[in-house]
Image: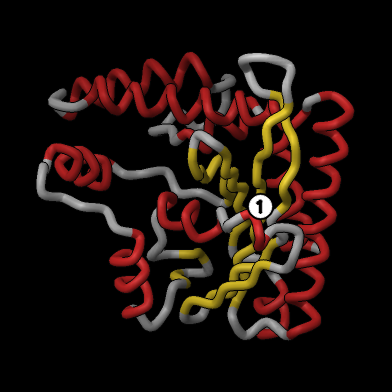
Amino acid sequence: MHYTMEVNPLNIFFVKSDSKGDRLLFRYPYKTENKDENKQKRSGRHNPYAINSTEDLLQNTQSQTSNICKGQLSGFTDEMLSTLFAVKAELCNRKFELKVNDVRFVGHPTLLPYRTNKDDNAAMILINIVFALQASASHSIVKCYYDLSKRLGKALRHEEKRCSYLTEEMKIMLAAHDEVSSLDSELNGENDEEEDNLRHSVSSTTTPTGLDTGPKSAFHLILQRSSLARSMKKVFEELSST
């Protein structure tokens, strides 16, 4: 039983870093924020003295004894993870491994050319598909996840060269993040009832009939719209079940 837990991934992440900055574009599993967390987010945004420092966040995380809660990764913000996983260019195309408390992150940062929106010239982008594992996972298990991340990076490089697949999928992901961000901005200062109504109306227009119509995160929308996100979800689920 312990061995099974050790083999199963806790999370899969997709991070990009380019001239526009670092971004965690997708993660699975993800938790839908509850109302209290949304309130905290908005109140934090209005505080002129609130400073988000990755170093401080990492310090807080390391002061915890565990970053696994009920089999889920906890204690890391998306901003923090994007900063941790988007490494410098000289660290690309080699093994990425980072241990924080009882979690080990494993990936293979890949640097590749991709099409920009402005013209047909290729710019460089770093992508990193990272797996979160139990820190107790054996060396052979860690190596398997590293090899898988490397293969996924190579596949994306090939598909980008063939048909600009990565460029198109990233557009979909970024658009969903922007959509949810603008919705959150509109909701600032709104009362809870109006918030629920607006979120419900957005949910009903973006969710196929029969699916959960609760509050949606950008990751939820991305999963509906992006074939890359669905592929990553499938990889995660198959690793957990077979």
At label 1, which amino acid type do we have?
A: Asn
Q: Looking at the image, which is closer to me, 72 or 182? A: 182
The residue that appears at 85% across and 44% down in the rendered structure is 155
Q: Looking at the image, which is closer to me, 117 or 233? A: 117
The residue that appears at 50% across and 32% down in the rendered structure is 212
Q: Where is residue 159 in the image (x, y as percent from the top left)?
A: 85, 34
Q: Is mark 1 on a helix, strand or loop?
A: strand
In the picture, the quarter occupied by the N terminus is bottom right
Crowding at mark 1 (Cα within 10 Å: few <14, some 14-19, many 20+): many
Q: Position of residue 18 (x, y in %)?
A: 57, 39
Picture colour scheme? secondary structure
| Left or right: 43 in relation to 157 | left
In the picture, the quarter occupied by the C terminus is bottom right
Look at mark 1 in the image and give the residue it sits on: 128
User: Splitting the image into 4 quarters, where does residue 65 fall?
Assistant: bottom left
The residue that appears at 41% across and 18% down in the rendered structure is 202
Q: Where is residue 231 in the image (x, y as percent from the top left)?
A: 75, 41
Q: Position of residue 206 (x, y in %)?
A: 52, 19
Q: How many labels does the image show?
A: 1
User: Splitting the image into 4 quarters, where does residue 236 fall?
Assistant: bottom right
User: Splitting the image into 4 quarters, where does residue 45 fall?
Assistant: top left
The image shows residue 153, relative to residue 179, as above or below, that is below
The image shows residue 169, relative to residue 145, as above or below, that is above
| Left or right: 154 in relation to 225 | right
Q: Looking at the image, which is closer to me, 56 or 119? A: 119
The residue that appears at 20% across and 20% down in the rendered structure is 194
